[in-house]
Amino acid sequence: MAKIRSKDMIAQYEQIMSDLKNKIYRPIYVLMGDEPYYIDAISNYIADKVLNEADKAFNQTIMYGADVDARTIFLASARPPMMTNYQIVIVREAQNVKLDGLEKYFEKPLATTILVLCLKGKTVDKRTSMYKILQKNGTVFDSAKLYDNELSGWIITYLKKKKVEIDTGAAGILAEYIGADLTRIANELDKLFILLPEGSTKITSEHIEKNTGISKEYNSFELANALLSKNRLKTYRIINYFDKNPKAGPMAMTIPSLFAKFVQLLKYHILIQNRALTPNQIASQLGVNPFFLREYDEGVRRYSIQNVFKSIELLREYDMKGKGWNTSGNVSEGELMREFAAKILSL
């Protein structure tokens, strides 16, 4: 089954949040998928904001799927609210419940109940009649993981809503360091926002380094850029730093990051052959901020499309070597990284 497009998912999330803030409620919310950030954001907003504190005592129920069955959820959802317009039933970990036992309720949900089902790491089969009923009578939100190359843009957009800017390089460093964990990224950004100097509205690489311990110079994001621009001095300086500080750039994390960068460069090679595409359209298809296109322009100048393929093959080979394939036990990660860097830089 094709993965939902991130742009469509985020647009649906924004619409759901807008409706909730305007007191437009659906009787059923099925929040499902592999990305917990949006599931938590929607369910927490409903739990915190729809009812006032006095009404929550009698009209808000939070259950956990491991402790309840479909009948318990049905009985809670089918009762009327007490002295208010709505009651809320939130089922966390609903992936542990056999939801087909609720299909009759889904067909005729109570208009005064807001039933929220949180299915983390699981989805309702879109081919079933139950899914079609849920779409008709409620809201189904599929919360998919973002791709690594979409994270920098997400960080920039997240901070923009708080009226805070961030250097594109700083966003890239943070994305590379944390990875596709939106909850953790949001928590780190909130901390950085609080720690901004008074009167400042911009997060920089220096600010990240000072408050998180992530080096602004020695990280896999900068290593990828050094390789793309064939900057030998910078490449070996970063690898030597990783060799002396293994936790800063373990090979198991560094090679996937480099692999993703060269795959993006391959896509860029192909996209720029279509002269009808504007830079913004190309950036959109790559899933990156247009600012980063200059890095790929540099990469195209340094690597032919054939050499990009060779680089990807080298990274695959050394990923296996880093896992012990076809190497002696005495070879360090630093030596392996210097080896594949030398081969890529010589292309």
Image (cartoon, rainbow, N blue to C red):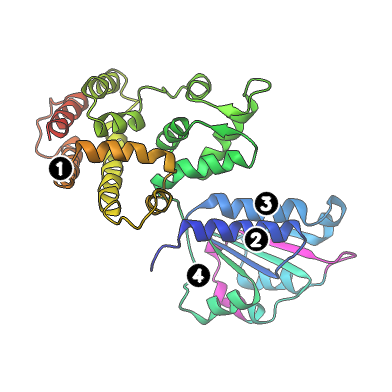
Choose the circle earlier in sequence order: 1 or 2.
2
Choose the circle earlier in sequence order: 1 or 3.
3
Task: Estimate the x, y position of residue 19 in percent, counting from the top left.
Answer: 71, 61
The residue singled out by tag 1 in the image is: 307
- Nearer to us of marks 2 and 4 is 2
Residue at the front extreme? 275
Label annotation for residue 44: 3
In the rendered structure, the answer to whether residue 56 lies left or right of residue 195 reads: right
Quadrant containing the C terminus is top left
Task: Estimate the x, y position of residue 245 in percent, counting from the top left.
Answer: 32, 20
Tell me where the magenta segment starts and ends, as one range. Answer: 81-103
Q: What amino acid type should be assigned to the residue bearing mark 2?
A: Ile
Bin the neighbour count of mark 2 within 10 Å (Cα to Cα): few under 14, some 14-19, many 20 and up. Answer: some
Residue 143 visible in the picture = no
Task: Estimate the x, y position of residue 317 in percent, counting from the top left.
Answer: 15, 41
Tell me, yes or no, whether the two marked residues, 1 and 3, touch with CB atoms within 8 Å.
Answer: no
Label 4: element kind: loop
The residue singled out by tag 4 in the image is: 124
Rounded to the nearest whole Å, what is the CA distance between mark 2 and mark 4? 19 Å
Camera-side residue of 98 and 10: 10
The residue singled out by tag 2 in the image is: 16
Bin the neighbour count of mark 3 within 10 Å (Cα to Cα): few under 14, some 14-19, many 20 and up. Answer: few
Camera-side residue of 326 and 24: 24
Label 1: element kind: helix
Task: Estimate the x, y position of residue 277 in percent, counting from the top left.
Answer: 36, 55
